[in-house]
Image: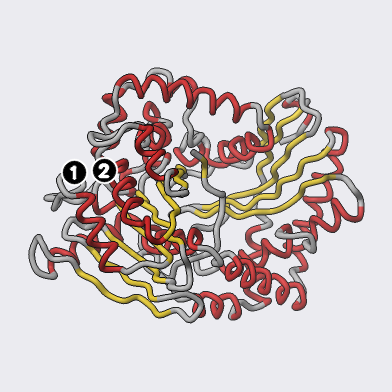
Amino acid sequence: MSRAPRSSFPAGRRGVSPSGAARNATGAARSAGGSSRAVTRTLSDDPLGGTVRRTVLPSGLRVLTEAIPAMRSVSFGIWVAVGSRDETGPQAGAAHFLEHLLFKGTKKRSALDISSEIEAVGGETNAFTTKEYTCYYARVLDEDLPLAIDVMCDAVADSVLEPADVETERGVILEEIAMHDDEPGDEVHDLFARAVYGDHPLGRLISGTEETVTPMTRRQIQGFYRRRYTPPQIVVAAAGNLDHAAVVRLVRQALGGTPLDTDPAAPAPHRSATPAVRVQPAATVVEPKETEQAHVILGCPGIDRTDERRFALGVLNNVLGGGMSSRLFQEIRERRGLAYSVYSYASQYADSGLFAVYAGCAPGKVDEVLQLTRAELARVAAEGLTEEEVARGKGMSKGSFVLGLEDTGSRMSRLAKGELLYGDLVPVDELLARVDAVTVDEVNTLAAELLARPMSLAVVGPFKPTDFSA
């Protein structure tokens, strides 16, 4: 099990929340002619891929596929619009706990059956939890797709959550939390999120903490499972050598008789029920640890994922710290040799976001690294980027996006994220055109506003909190 990357290429056109997309899907299915009729339409015939189709089942569950006949494999995923931000304080870690448990057995299969059936055909399965969604996926040969669909749908829809398995996985998760605490390069990112978001769910650990996971009961997890894993909250996506109608048929068969084989009488719980984001005043947070290397993050609140400036932000991020040619990498590593790793990143959520710079360096070099980072951010805020830099940043955005679509897994993810997070799938050519349309003025206007915001600082290393001024 793993946690997802912190950021991704902008994938949507409209500001449709997961809950909004789910309600629209349910409404479309019902208005299209009764409780047994599915609604299918072709979304695109992408020249860089294959035919993309979308079916909304009567229950509101959505199935999207991209047929790529040249491939001999298929990636299949079940994506649920539920993450750690949907938990209350006492529930912290429930979404991640549940992700572990769904592979532990169903009414038809044991945990060994789930893994061995896929591995027997050379396939692979995994899952990850993020702050806003959870994904379960498998990658198999095209001829084994029916098996993958049956196994994965069974695991996600009909897990039994045996009490003994809850206790076993509790131990596994506590070990995972302890392992995370031993990885300061990961811990500093969570520390930074807490500095910006405080006690809001976006500021919490996805895994929960020892204090929340230890007392969590099977009943609490079961309740979270059945309240949150409802058809309108779920997107099934597949990409590779497949037939859309066959995938839809196999999904309906696999879900038949399970709790996901329903026509909901009321809308599913949705994200608007979670607390509104309240960004904290800029703060300095230090986690004292006797490490050989210090890990620092300097950053501020960013923009949400439907903000029209997200394409300009991608360009700005590339130029500042997105690669070996970036300003920060060249100044801090190449010219001065102060750090092995230095980069900037943007994380975007439904209603908020982060922009930050990370560096890992010797403890004695932290002050100089921070001084150079602050100076570079201030310089870009005041002077902006050059036309040549913006052109390079746009090229990086386009190239990394297209090159990232060279396998079925990334294409499956693109389908699911477009539907789940944006309620829309923008054609590749249109996305590239959106990047091309970014102007120097747009990037520099955003830089002047974003990089002038008060900055929070998170540090993990052999320091005292008083070693850094707020």
Of residues 102 and 91, the one nearer the viewer is 102
Where does the image place residue 431, in percent across and percent down from the top left? 52, 75
Residue 157: which disc? 2
Seen in the picture, residue 326 relative to 92 is either above or below; the reply is below
Numbered label attached to residue 112: none
Examine the rendered structure and indicate whether residue 37 appears above or below residue 50: above
Residue 133 visible within the image: no
Mark 2 neighbour density, 10 Å: few (under 14) some (14–19) many (20 or more): many
Image location (x, y in percent) of residue 232: 25, 54
- Tag 1: amino acid: Thr
Is 361 situated above or below 141? above
* Residue pointed to by mark 1: 258
Residue at 72 percent of width and 26 percent of height = 465
Q: In which quadrant of the rendered view does residue 129 lie?
A: top left
Asked whether residue 234 is in view, the answer is yes
Count of number-bearing discs? 2
Quarter residue 229 falls in: top left
Query: Seen in the image, is 204 located left or right of residue 439?
Result: left
- Coloring applied to the structure: secondary structure
User: Looking at the image, which is closer to me, 286 or 293?
Assistant: 293
Residue found 40% across the figure and 80% down from its top: 45
How far apart are the two marked residues, 2 and 1, measured between alpha carbons?
6 Å
Q: Between residues 459 and 325, which one lies in front from this camera angle?
A: 325
Please state the horizontal and vertical placement of residue 430, each as a whole percent of the image.
49, 79
Check whether the beta carbons of the residues at disc 2 and disc 1 lie within 8 A of each other.
yes
Disc 2 residue type (three-letter): Ala
Q: Tell me the SS state at disc 2.
A: helix
Q: Secondary structure at mark 1?
A: loop
Q: In this rendering, would 193 be left or right of 330? A: left
